[in-house]
Image (cartoon, rainbow, N blue to C red):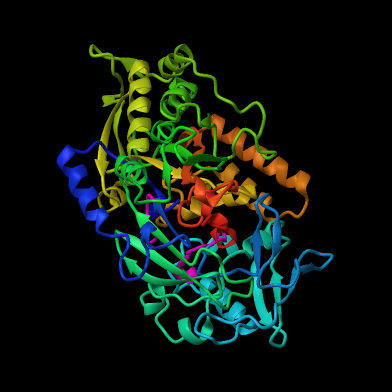
Amino acid sequence: MTARSIRGTVAVTLATVLSLTAAACSQPGGSDGSGSGSGADSAVVGIAYEPDSLSPLLGYGKDGNSKIFDGLLALDGDMKLRPALATALPDVSDDGLTYTYRLRSGVKFSDGKPFGAKDVVFTYRTILDEKTNNASRTELDAVKSIEASGDDTVVFTLKYPYAPFAQRTVLPIAPEHIAGKQDVNTGAFTTHPIGTGPYLLTKWSKGEKLSFRANPDYWGGAPKVKKFTMAIIKDDDVRATRLRSGELDGAILPPNLAKGFARGSGMRTYAATTYDYRTVTLPTHNKVAGDTAIRRALDVAVDRRAMVDSILNGEGRPAYGPVPTDSEWFTKGTERVHDLAAAKEILDEAGWKPGKDGIRTKDGVRAAFPLWYLTGDKLRQDHALAYASDAKKAGIAITTEAGTWEVIEPRMKQDAVLAGGGSPADPDFDQYALLKSSLAGDGFNNMAWYDNKTVDQALEAGRRSGDKAARKAAYDTVQRELVKNPGYTFLTHIDHLYVVKDRFGALTTQVEPHDHGLASGPWWNVEDWTPKK
């Protein structure tokens, strides 16, 4: 989970809305041709966040679909792997330790230089270099070596059979001749990328928009949408206003605003099923939130179904862990039923006794702690307020606080945070960085500083086994341990809603991760759109 991937809005004054809208109105239709008024072959969509970097070496596009770049493989609409820069799915050795990719010939980077095996080797070796500021490096822990065999073949050798390795090779490939000549963490490539993808970045106005034009020499065929702009609008209400006024061709919106665009309005609403969850971190180092009884009580005191119904307008599901309940990897029987009486009983038995004000204490410690959410994130704010309200009924006082990530991040070791995460395809993607004790304090990995040796061992077993039944048993162990000692209170899995103008025809969505918006939603395959004239 990353700071850049968290979205939402706060209530703002009318003056603020007007000023934001006025500022935004000046953005489309500039000299880069990014506005919706610049022709039938353009599209402008509103997203809720922007990336910190556009370099795949630093984590951009690691789940594929980056628009500027391609991976060796890509995911289709059904989330099945398909060849991209590779000519076919990899040849895998019988022991599961060697993956051989044969590369597509004739592919060029957008600066005209040829793509080859050396670029693949450079990309993966750079990401694995500890000097590279890539928080997702542990996702490639299984890689022992990457070698080129001529210009058209790359061979990965693994330390252990890592079942989902092929899914990790959707990450974008960077050009060695550009990125290899710069500081990987601070060089110009981080904001002025060169790739092999269907679009070229023409301008990045930080906090405002990213503008792209179609790559006329794209190996997959030149896109029919020639100019594509992503307007960065953090406020949901402003995003909806700009969509309604015609400034945007599409946008991601929370359920309550998406429902305002009725059929027949020239708009279509698309729902994307996701692995995107909202959770409350319960820091191990906090005397109250780190207490197992407090954690277990909160786990059953919270009314998840009410959150889905009232906050999400039914567009989502209760969450009991990072794995959605409809996933084949979900462990049946780990659902937690809302039971306030059971929550009170857990606290009573652990010695947390109600005080005169109804708030419990134990050994002179009051059952109280702060819960932070990101300023400007209405969805998180609503979850935080509902969570605090449920907790108070059990005798736990939670004070909700809004702040920027600069304010929140230094407090994460001690204070609870309304966080988000989730990644499709494999349970290792969801759980390892979230729960592994060795990753506590590593940026936004293991934000709760969760420390459970049984979970650590199961995570390693799930990661290192090539046998699906053994992996299922390992992740069952993880999910059952989270019932016994939840370091997080998982609240909801959220379906993403998008509204797009009819002129682009019937579109599709993929199953989406938490880190969404830039290349997710109906524009996950914008390079294949055929706009109506």
Residue 404 x %, y %: 26, 49
Residue 119 appears in view = yes
Q: Point out the stretch of residues depicted in magenta.
A: 47-65
Whether 297 is drawn above or below 153: the answer is above
Residue 49 magenta-highlighted: yes
Asked whether, in this view, residue 250 is left or right of residue 288, the answer is right
Q: Main secondary structure of the magenta part?
A: loop
Whether 41 is drawn above or below 157: the answer is above
Asked whether, in this view, residue 320 is left or right of residue 246, the answer is right
Residue at the front extreme, as displayed: 533
Q: 2 or 299, which is in the foreground?
A: 2
Whether 92 is drawn above or below 403: the answer is below
Residue 168 x %, y %: 62, 62
Residue 448 appears in view = no
Residue 240 magenta-highlighted: no
Residue at the right extreme, as displayed: 94
Whether 506 is drawn above or below 286: the answer is below
Residue 421 x %, y %: 48, 46
Could you tell me which residue is drawn at 71 percent across and 88 percent down?
Answer: 150
Asked whether, in this view, residue 390 is left or right of residue 138, the answer is left
Q: 298 or 330, which is in the foreground?
A: 330
Could you tell me which residue is drawn at 45 percent across and 21 percent down?
Answer: 306
